[in-house]
Amino acid sequence: MKSQKEEAWIGLLGVPCLLIPSGVAVFIAYDKGMSFAPLLMFTGTVIWGGLFWLFPFIQDRFRKDKKKICFDERDQLIHKKAVMASYVALWLYFVAACVTTWRIVGPNGSISVNVMPLTLVGGLVLFTFVQGLASLIQYGRGAKDGAE
Amino acid sequence: MNKAQEGALICVILMPVAALVCGALGVGLAYVKAVPLPRLLLEFTFVFALLGCAWLIPFLLRRTRKSKISFDERDQLIIKKAALTAYVVLWLYFVTACVIAWWIVGPHGSISVNVMPLTLAGGLAIFGFVHNIAVLIQYGRGARGEES
């Protein structure tokens, strides 16, 4: 299996890796009160999770062995398309989350402030899932007779 | 200046203003109950989902207009890069908005539900602004003698 395809599977199955630290951060803040540690943990996880897709490009740029290409143009194109699809899904998710909350609570109501970070975590999970899925679909459409 | 640049120049002002006005108007109308909520929610969802994905329109139009090439590969690449940049900024904006609200109010606090659609409107304004600025910068880096 091509390494980028393996990474897509890892991304798909690694969704709990994003859920766990961010969920723990929200729980710690709720239980122990707001402090720097859970805030940093949460912010770091969501920023890292949301921008992790840039890592292969950075890795490719700074690779030591210039002759060995492990992230070629086709991989880059597939990766970018997957990220774009994920961001579109993420935007639609945020619209749906806002409208749903607004509908349920009503325009004069109020919500727990924890809804916002939890919405963000949900968005991150969706982003990672759609990105992995889109990558796998695109690799699957490619040369089925290609040697992996 | 080509058509894409002209469009970006107009949209860099128009889109953020439209997003903020639509968002504020929607929230205001819902708050004073001037419009039935289900209808308002439907319109809000439609407008925001469409505006957030408006950058895809040239790609869709290109598929229908096979005879005249007015949106070539370079234009596509520029629009895609600008969209990716704008989405990254949008993600960072949502993280910042959530973390600030969480920090200020505290994990046991509550916020008005209208904060969520207003955050969405702000996100759309930022997305529109960054996307169009990125388009203008990329076109500016290219051929300076380009005509429509």
Image (cartoon, coloured by chain):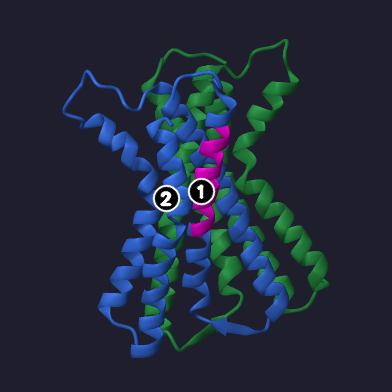
Range covered by the magenta-colored residues: A125-138
Q: Quadrant of residue A8?
A: top left
- Of callouts 1 and 2, which one flags the residue occurring earlier in the amino acid sequence? 2
Q: Disc 1 on helix, strand or loop?
A: helix
| Rendered position, B21 above or below A79 | below
Q: Choose between B75 and A18: the one closer to the eye.
A: A18
Q: Can you give x and y, in whole percent of width and height, for residue B123 in the image?
A: 52, 57
Q: Which residue is label 1 attached to?
A: B127
Q: What amino acid type is highlighted by mark number 1?
A: Phe
Residue A131, magenta (yes or no): yes
The chain whose colour is blue is A
Q: Residues within 10 Å of mark 2 (few under 14, many from 20)?
A: some
Q: Which residue is label 2 attached to?
A: B89
Q: Dots 1 and 2: beta carbons under 8 Å?
A: yes
Q: Residues within 10 Å of mark 1 (few under 14, many from 20)?
A: many
Residue B82 in view, yes or no: yes
Q: Residue at x 80, y 74 (%)?
A: B34
Residue B9 in view, yes or no: no
Q: Residue at x 49, y 25 (%)?
A: B77
Q: Choose between A67 and B106: the one closer to the eye.
A: A67
The chain whose colour is green is B
Q: Residue at x 47, y 34 (%)?
A: A80
Residue A142 appears left or right of B92:
right
| Rendered position, A121 above or below B52 | below
Q: Choose between A27 and A115: the one closer to the eye.
A: A27
Q: Quadrant of residue B21?
A: bottom right
Q: Residue at x 43, y 75 (%)?
A: B101
Residue A84, magenta (yes or no): no
Report in which chain the residue with disc 2 lies. B
Q: Choose between B58 and A96: the one closer to the eye.
A: A96
Q: Can you give x and y, in whole percent of width and height, for residue A140 in the image?
A: 56, 30
| Rendered position, B65 above or below B111 | above
